[in-house]
Amino acid sequence: MRLTEEQEELRSAVRSLLTRHEGAEAWRPLTEQIGVAGLAVPEEYGGAGGGARDVHVLMEELGRSLSPLPFLGSAVLTAGALLATGDKAACGRLLPGLAEGGSVGTLAWAEQGSWDPEAIHAEAVPGPGGAWHITGTKEHVLDWPRVDVLLVAARTAAGVSLFDVSVDAAGAHRTSVVTMDGTRSQAQWVLDGAEARLIGVDGDGGRSLAQVRDLACAALAAEQVGAAARCLELTVAYARDRVQFGRPIGSFQAVKHRLADAYVLVESARSAALGAAFAADQDPGALPRAAAVAKSVCSEAFSAVAGEMIQLHGGIGITWEHDAHRYFKRAHGAGELFGSAARHRARLVAGLGLTRH
């Protein structure tokens, strides 16, 4: 599995911009100069018409820099959910702004710490004039200072469905949540009879969410690989420079073994993440399994390598000034986002028709 020359050029361009523009200020140049917000949006809606492998490249670079940008929540989850519904009217209304980057979207999905459709208890009831009204609480909603498009998963008499809710609708309240990972903002949305517009077919939201979950897991796996690779890169550099007992600590056999093990973890995770991206583009039927593998493998690899980064940096690795704790916190948060590694292994077991003992 190899990326194209154009995708490697995309990587170079994104890395260059992220080097020059830090944090939230990188969103505008990335969207205006490279068009990242519409990377995987079809051209008919103003996007670049790229695929999961293009998203993979971008997410690796965002993970490498622990970027706080809203690409995952807006360009992957929100745009992906719209496309998955097949609702051309909703796509035509909402996707051009998202693809341009002028508007930012989020998908309010999880409840009680679970992204499984069975856990959705927010209720949507029909009202006069074709409007719906949603009541419920949504957690772990990826946040950004200005959210313009809010998609909500709620349960109707027909089953789980997707809705468009105005961010300033009466009865819709957003509260920022303090999380361990300060580089990825989250919010809680409380909906109390908030007016909503149905997107797609009533009761078909579970299918759309399953598709979005797999694309999101593939994208997040790429981010985890980029971050883990950066952890290893920084740790190797430190091991070369840090001298103890008259020698660089990287010359000690025990340190070499740990760095070699970390390298194996990173490269194994990279293969799993690429496998999910290639499946999304070339064999969608294989994506659910590939995405579950990628999310499981990459979550555990990133956590392990981030932990080694702290251990091998010694005392400086636990200081507030060093970046090690930021990678460790991102590893923890990303590992739980869209379901834990154990949850995705359970998906694999169920998909293979095996029984866990």
Image (cartoon, rainbow, N blue to C red):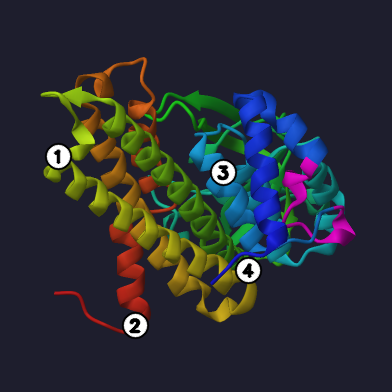
Residue 353, image quadrant: bottom left
SS at mark 2 in the image: loop
User: Is-magenta flag for residue 35?
Assistant: yes
Is disc 1 placed on a helix, strand or loop? loop
Q: In this rendering, which labeled residue sits more in front, label 1 or label 3?
A: 1
Which is more toward the observer, 194 or 85? 85
Residue that carries the numbered disc 3 in the rendered image: 61
Q: Provide residue 75's location: percent of width, then percent of height.
A: 68, 48
Q: Residue furthest front?
A: 246
- The Cα–Cα distance between marks 1 and 3, rounded to whole angstroms, is 31 Å
Specify which label sits upstream in the sequence, 2 or 1: 1
Query: What's under tag 3, amino acid-wise?
Result: Glu
Q: Residue at x 20, y 20 (%)?
A: 315
Amino acid found under the numbered disc labelled 1 = Phe
Crowding at dot 3, Cα within 10 Å, few <14 / some 14-19 / many 20+, comes out as many
Answer left or right for 88 relative to 275.
Answer: right
Q: Earlier in the sequence, mark 1 or mark 4?
A: 4
Disc 4 secondary structure class: loop
**Is 239 above or below relative to 5?**
above
Q: Magenta residues, as a range?
A: 34-46
Q: Position of residue 328 (x, y in %)?
A: 33, 34
| Residue identifier under label 1 | 252
Give me the residue at 54% from left, 55% from top.
219
Residue indicated by mark 4: 204
The quarter holding residue 150 reads top right
Q: In the rendered image, which residue does mark 2 sit on?
A: 352
Q: Which numbered disc covers residue 63? A: none
- Say few, some or many: other residues with alpha carbon within 10 Å of mark 1 (under 14 / 14 to 19 / 20 or more): few
- Is residue 331 one of those drawn in magenta? no
